[in-house]
Image (cartoon, helix red, strand yellow):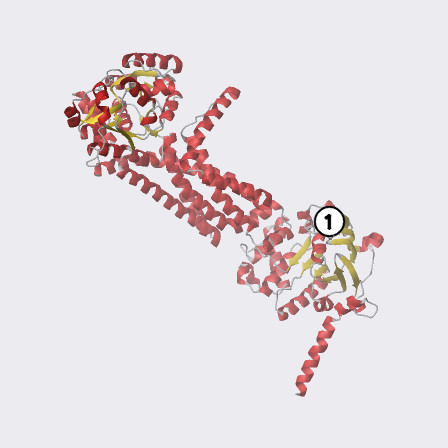
Amino acid sequence: MPNLVRRSCGAADGSADMIDIDNLVLSYPSSTKPALDHVSLSIPEGQLVALVGASGSGKTTLLKTINRLNDPQSGTISLDGEDVSAIPGPLLRRRIGYAFQGIGLFPHMSVAENIGITPQLLGWSKPDIAARVRELLALVDLPADFAARTPAMLSGGQQQRVGVARALAARPKIMLMDEPFGALDPLTRDALGQSYRALHERLGLTTIMVTHDVQEAVLLADRIVVMEAGRIVADGTPRELMSEKAEPRVMELMSVPMRQAERVQAILSGAAHV
Amino acid sequence: MSEQIASAWRLLPEYLSAHIVLSAAALGAGLLIALPLAVLAARRPAFAWPLLSFASLVQTIPGLALLALFYPLLLALSALSGRWFGVTFPALGFLPALLALTLYALLPILRNGVTGLTGVDKAAVEAAKGVGMTPMQSLWRVEAPLAAPVVMAGVRTAAVWTIGAATLATPIGQTSLGNYIFSGLQTENWVFVLFGCAASAVLAFIVDQALGLVETGTALRDARRIVAGVAALLVGTGLAVTGLARPNAASYVVGAKNFSEQYILAELFAERLQAEGANVRQKQGLGSAIAWRALVSDEIDVYVDYSGTLWANVMGRTDVPPRDVMLAELTQWMKEKRGVTVLGSLGFENAYAMLMRRARAKELNIRSLEDLSGKAGNLALGADIEFLDRPEWAALQKAYGLAFRDKRSFNPTFMYRALSSGEVDVISGFSSDGRIIADDLLALEDPRHAIPSYDAVILLAPKRADDALLQRALKPLVGAISVDLMRAANLSVDRDNDKSTPLAAARALESQIRK
């Protein structure tokens, strides 16, 4: 895997970045503490970045600020060099893929209608949409005859595949994913994570994925950004964050998967000796 | 019985069409207002509380009162608008009924609308935003279809309420199935009351089923059910509209207040006008003040009122001139000040009268109030609930100094029973009441003219002042109905057994007049 990680600081090396976040501040009316406290982050094209951190650390808020589901009090976001505050929210979101834990498939529409919704909003022709739906069903490994089904007829994993297909339908360059596989069983979750990683490579996407599962982040991401209380407290490759140079708190967090693996190993070998 | 059912059936097309058109218009207007408000309240919770509170408050106003309140409100608004823009509108009939029922329909639609919209799966709403829908697209493509079953349940409730409450439009001059109920209540014609209730219930049931079809259609996403339900409703409303559209042109409208005598006289007038080839509609069950207003504003063409009532309530007079003087002055004043033609007196009075059992009066040798005054100290008076507070009672006391041993108030039915049983000796009744014949009562004479006269007079609307057909049809009735004839006709409608309908009573009365 090519090392794409650059710890850039905002606009300094500007145009090469797909996503450029500069000095975001956002607080919710209900809270005195800011949800985002001067956050800056630059992500080059093609990177898969995992945002990790405890609940309430600001991961989801940051993600939703990128596609303007939230608007910040100050700071700027540029996507491919274009300031998002100049683009109306709905138009911006038709250019960005968005998948989340709730999935939110429209229960009154067929799978095909769900997948084709953003192209339809963009005014694609019916044959183009139909062709794209067939293409996407294949891409997310679902049979073509699922097109006519309703979401209620699908399993959780199948629904999330449709959710990812829907997010990809209008050929976005950027994907925002909020715990997309969080509610799935471990097997499905692992399989979907790997298929998504493959899609990310194949389509040349730039992805930000929020997860609280460090193991998932380590396995899928090129780069991990750790958030705490609205700030970025660590940013690097999985290997960097797990090295001894990292802060103790971060290292402790990052070493959870390793420690778990060791315990599993110990239990299994212990059992073998009995 | 079967005669009453047959006459109820004859009235059904007119009453039902009017009822359907009114209910459909109110429900339609309710939807147009409540649905956007529900969207607003669902999006901005700050609006939800005041909106729902207002709608609930409206719901707590009794239906009849709400309908009645729109009459003075519209009257004032119409006067203002007439002054400012030269445009007036009717304060009676369809408009106030429509406004009141529309308000009534708001709550269930609004409440279910808010519940439905706020209850839509949050994930679906977030996804709608996430895929790039504008707020309007999200509303139409996602939120509205998902909320539709709950909203439709509210629409069903509103429809049933509206159809039920529309029966209350009758007293403010809007024809509805309530005409059966109100006229039936007044004449104690329970067949009519039941017929009106049943017709309104059947209508509500059918509409509810059609809306239910739409509701399950939205829930199951089955377009055929939705189309079938909506089509059934539209066809029904369309039929009602065409049914109403026909008889309107160039017809005469006969008004009637809300008691038996008025129903009988209205039928009598209608029969006579039809015999002259006129197209006739009736507006029955009007409140006393409302009937007068409707006549002055040409909404009804003719009705019967009583000289003493007009003297006090319309002219604002408190003096009590002799019968002939009052009638002459009234006729002149009406023409000059209001443009209303007093065609003449029918020949009988419906005045307050002091009544005794004939046998008892004979025994005590009492024929007039003068005879009574010396003997009142040994006698008991029964009065209806308001009589003892009325100016007529004060005038009687002043003129004859009546000091009874005992005075008791009753509702009218029990007052007559108390007289029959000897519990009281004298009661306050009405001079054209049929029970005077039935119970063999004597109305005591009033030689000092203390009680104002209440001659039944035919009033014509300003625009019908010189109408030849009305004159031809109704002029022969002037002076033609004696108080005995009217009492007999009233009795035939009011009695408990072998009841006549007002129409049958009117025909019997007509045959008596021709003799």
Q: Tell me which amino acid carries mark 1.
A: Pro
Quadrant of the rendered image containing residue A161: bottom right
Residue B41, given in percent of the width and then of the height, sits at: 57, 44
- Compared with B479, B202 (above or below) is below
Q: Nearer the viewer, residue A78 or B255?
A: B255
Q: Is residue B360 above or below residue B113?
A: above
Q: Does residue B303 show up? A: no
A210 left or right, relative to B482: right
Q: Is residue A116 above or below residue B38?
A: below
Give the residue furthest to the bottom: A274
**Observer-nearest residue: B510 or A151?**
B510
**Mark 1: which secondary structure?**
loop
Q: Is residue B94 left or right of residue A194?
A: left
Image side of residue B26 versus residue A212, left or right: left
Q: Position of residue B99 (x, y in %)?
A: 46, 34
- For mark 1, what is the residue? A72
- B88 to the left or right of A261: left
Q: Position of residue B461 (x, y in %)?
A: 36, 19
**Quadrant in the picture for residue A224:** bottom right
**Nearer-the-camera pick, A81 or A213:** A213
What x and y, as percent, mark residue B141?
Answer: 56, 49
